[in-house]
Image: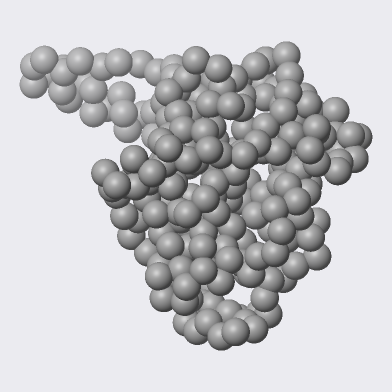
Amino acid sequence: MNIIVLIKQVPETSNVKMDPETGTMIREGLDTIINPLDLYAIEAAIRLKEQHGGKVTALSMGPPAAMKALREAMAMGCDDAALVSDRKFGGADTWATSYTLSQAIKEMGDFDLILAGERATDGDTGQVGPGVGAWMNLPVVSYVAHIKEVTKDSITCERLMEEGYQVVKVPFPAVITTVKEIAEPRLPTLRGNKRARQTEIPVYSTENMTLDVGSLGLKGSPTKVVKIETPKVMRSGTLVRANSEEALEAAVDQLVEWLKERELV
């Protein structure tokens, strides 16, 4: 079974910054990690390989610094990795990102399954995994909590629903997005780190991919961030200090009067 797992390098949540001009995230100079929800997809992919054979390839789209995330995925147990990187891909929304990734996957050759985390912590849309499936005309099963059965031709999963689970069977090749319940991610190993450092990771760009230039990056993104504002928390009120018994009684009377004015009592 040949599995491709989509991962993303994201800023640590406390370090997210936005460019007010373009409405895109500023990624340069930030501490980054593998998107935490992608770790569950990586673990699920590795377990499928251990149970059914084959290989797992981690795939990411981002700047050259995203190599760090790919090597970490390899240290966890992925066999190979590939990076989709080009300045022309910068500023892509989920539509342009899923298009570019789908074209890279076509260049990579045959596969049985594409796995992805349910969403990324920086964008929080949950659209890229299903978007890749749509561009490639593949069946998509989202929010998968359990993989029940794998045969030569199909995979049966349990989707997490609001009121339980839905059992879905789809033929290969297919796309699956996972939730935390699917597996507990393992830690990178020393041997895995050594192999990851020594592996040459290929890069897919406009120079070695067949692409519609009009569908790339910021210019190829149909969704735009029109305006960015930081919400201001405005609190107005009266501070009453009750430092004595008389002041406490006055404060209670004042509170009761305030509630009556607003017809709350």
Name the spot of residue 127 as percent of width and height, x first. 67, 51
For the point 40% across and 70% down, the residue is 50
Please, is residue 224 above or below residue 5 in the view?
above
For the residue pair 172 and 1, the one nearer the viewer reads as 1
Q: From the viewer's perspective, is residue 13 above or below residue 26?
A: below
Side of 152 where 181 appears, left or right: left
Residue visible at 91% across and 34% down in the picture: 214
In the image, 222 versus 205, the foreground residue is: 205
Residue at the image position 73 percent from the left and 23 percent from the top = 87
Q: Relative to 180, is 178 on the left or the right?
A: right
Going 50% across and 84% down the picture, which residue do you hit? 149
Q: Is residue 217 left or right of residue 112?
A: right
Q: Is residue 37 visible?
A: no
**In the figure, residue 231 lies in which quadrant?**
top right
Residue 143, given in percent of the width and then of the height, sits at: 55, 64
Name the quarter where the C terminus is drawn: top left
Where in the figure is residue 53, as x and y percent of width and height? 47, 73
Farthest left residue? Answer: 245
Q: Quadrant of residue 57?
A: bottom right
- Residue 114 shows up from this direction: yes
Q: Is residue 177 left or right of residue 97?
A: left
Image quarter of the N terminus: bottom right
Q: How is the image coloured?
A: one colour
Q: Position of residue 262 (x, y in %)?
A: 48, 34
Q: Is 190 above or below relative to 237? A: below
Q: Is residue 163 above or below residue 227?
A: below
